[in-house]
Amino acid sequence: MPIITVPTKDLVYQGDHFDPMKGVKASDKKDGDITDKVTVKGDIDTSKTGLQYITYHVKDSDGYYYTYKRGVYVNDADLAPNPELSGIKDITIKKGQEFDLLKDVKAKDKSGKDLTSDIVTSGEVDTNKPGKYKVGYAVSDTDGHISAEGRTITVK
C-alpha cells in the first residue's frame, strides 16, 4: 500500500510562489520511491488569502492507491515577517585597527534564503580617529519587506 508524506508547513504568504510538490514524497514497500507517480488535483492561488485545498493521488504497481487532502493557508502579505538581520552588535576597536563593517553581519528572508549580499550600510568609521560612530544596516526581501538596525562602533 503506498503512502504520501507532505511538509508540515502549510502556511504561505500572499504573492509567494507555491510549489505543491516541494517536499512531497511517496513510497511503497514493494515499489520503493514512487514520488514521480504522484498527481496533484487543484491549485493554491496565492493571490487570495484564506484556507485552500489540494489533493494528492498515487497508485502503486499492484493497483493500490493513496489519496491525501492538504490544506494550505495563504496569509495576508502584510503579515509576512521582515527579513532578519543578525550579528549587529555595538563594538569597540583600537585606533588604526582594520575593520569590515559587514564582518559577522548576516541576513535571511522568511524562507531562510541568504540575503547577506543585499545588505546596504550607511555611515562611516574612521579607524584612525578615536570616537563613537553610528552605522546603519538595511536589507529588503523580494516582497519589499525591509529590516533596518544600527550599531555604535567605538574607536579607542
Image (cartoon, rainbow, N blue to C red):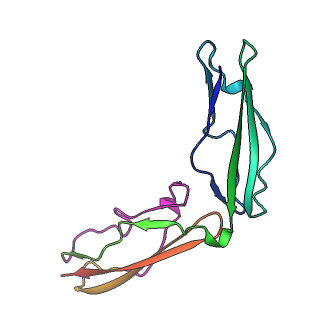
Residue 125: % across, % down: 33, 79
Residue 58: % across, % down: 73, 26
Q: Quadrant of residue 41?
A: top right
- Residue at 24 percent across and 84 percent down: it is 129
Residue segment shown in magenta? 95-124
Residue 116 vs residue 37, the one in the foreground = 37
- Residue at 75 percent across and 58 percent down: it is 46
Q: Is residue 117 above or below residue 133?
A: above
- Residue at 66 percent across and 27 percent down: it is 35
Q: Is 5 positioned to the left or the right of 123 in the image?
A: right
- Residue at 58 percent across and 43 percent down: it is 7
Q: Quadrant of residue 109?
A: bottom right
Q: Main secondary structure of the magenta part?
A: loop
Res. 19 visible in picture: no
Q: Is residue 135 above or below residue 27?
A: below
Asked if residue 80 is among those painted magenta in the image, a careful observer would answer no
